[in-house]
Amino acid sequence: MDFYITALIQGLCFGGIALGIYLSMKIFNIPDITTDGSYTLGGVVTGSLMTHHQSGFVIALAVIVSGAIAGALTGIIHTKLKINALLAGILVMTALYSVNLTILGRSNLPLLGLPGLFMSINFIADNPNQNALLISLIFVAAITLAIGYMLKTDFGIAMRATGNSEAMVRALGVNTDRMKIIGLAVANALTALSGYLVAQQQGFADISMGIGIVITGLGSVIIGETVINWLQITSVWLSLTLVLAGAIVFQLVLAFTLSIGVDANLLKLVTAAFVLVIVGLPRLTGRAA
């Protein structure tokens, strides 16, 4: 049972990535590869500040700001320099590797024994796994409520409209470049928060922890989007909840894969295959119909 509780915790920790990719790809239609770098950035900033015994509030704030700066840089390169969004993300992600390595100071930094989020708060003192699950649930619920509220405001509606019809929104006097920059900043701040949670949950920060992480986020979003389209859901709150549920389902599937004896070395292959199935199945089903 603890194995699957750990998978649930991992799914919740990846909720920030799922929400971030949902914002960038589904709200703004921007394939943002900055995710790989900003996720690692969140982890290394967390690890570095934890080893310097900074408070939890300072660490979380630093992670949000650093992730937002990374996303804003991608947005500025894309909107102001008129560089393709995919290439802009790749450029920032590549630069972040050096930034992350400089912040971390080495390739791997152990965090075991340091007073992190999951050790400082004790709702269930006699069961660390259940305690971590509850903390993760509260943390992710808080950021989901914040994003949901933002998307329901006039500013959030303008952001959503920018993704749906940029020309129309620009004709109404909205600065669409600013919307994209802010949207990518928010998306990567969420991604960095996932790195913040995962680094503390797994007990170390690693320079390569973000490699391929965009696939995990994309798979989570696709699972949620499949249900959203199937049920024809228009509610922002329910859409965000289903995206989070997609992150949890994704991790549970990987946990099940390991539990039936699949070699851990093949996990990335299984991940890619699972995402391919999720992407391809609705289309194959549609053709068959």
Image (cartoon, rainbow, N blue to C red):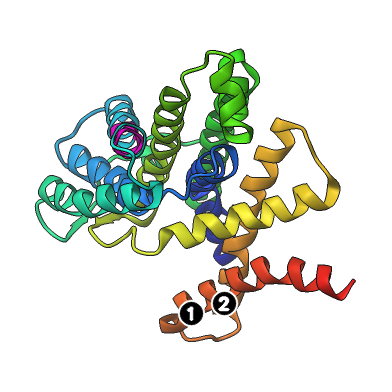
Query: In the rendering, at what x and y percent does residue 196 appear?
Result: 35, 43
Q: Residue 104 placed where, x, y %?
A: 15, 49
Which residue in the structure is indicated by mark 1?
269
Give the camera-side residue of 28 and 64.
Answer: 28
Quadrant containing the N terminus is: bottom right
**Within the image, what quadrant is residue 154 found in?**
top right
Find residue 140 and report its image quarter.
Answer: top right
User: Horizontal and vertical percent for residue 257?
Assistant: 58, 77
Above-or-below relation of 14 to 148: below
Q: Residue at x 82, y 67 (%)?
A: 286
In this rendering, position of residue 15 left or right of residue 284: left
Q: Residues within 10 Å of mark 2 (few under 14, many from 20)?
A: few
**Residue at coordinates 48% horizontally, 79% vertically from top-left?**
269
SS state under label 1? helix
Q: Which mark is residue 122?
A: none
Residue 26: x percent and y percent?
59, 43
In the displayed structure image, the side of residue 255 where residue 287 appears, left or right: right
Q: Secondary structure at mark 2?
A: helix
Q: Which residues are magenta?
A: 68-77
Residue 73 colored magenta?
yes
Pointer 2: what residue? 273
Is there a contact, CB below 8 Å, between mark 1 and mark 2? yes
Q: Is residue 213 visible?
A: yes
Task: Please name the predominant secondary structure of the magenta segment in the image.
Answer: helix
The structure residue drawn at horizontal position 27% and vertical position 62%, both measured from the top left corner, is: 208
Amino acid type of the residue tagged 2 in the rendering:
Ala
Q: Amino acid at mark 1?
A: Leu
The answer to whether residue 163 is magenta is no
Q: CA distance from mark 1 to mark 2?
A: 6 Å
Between residue 65 and residue 2, name the one nearer to us. Answer: 65
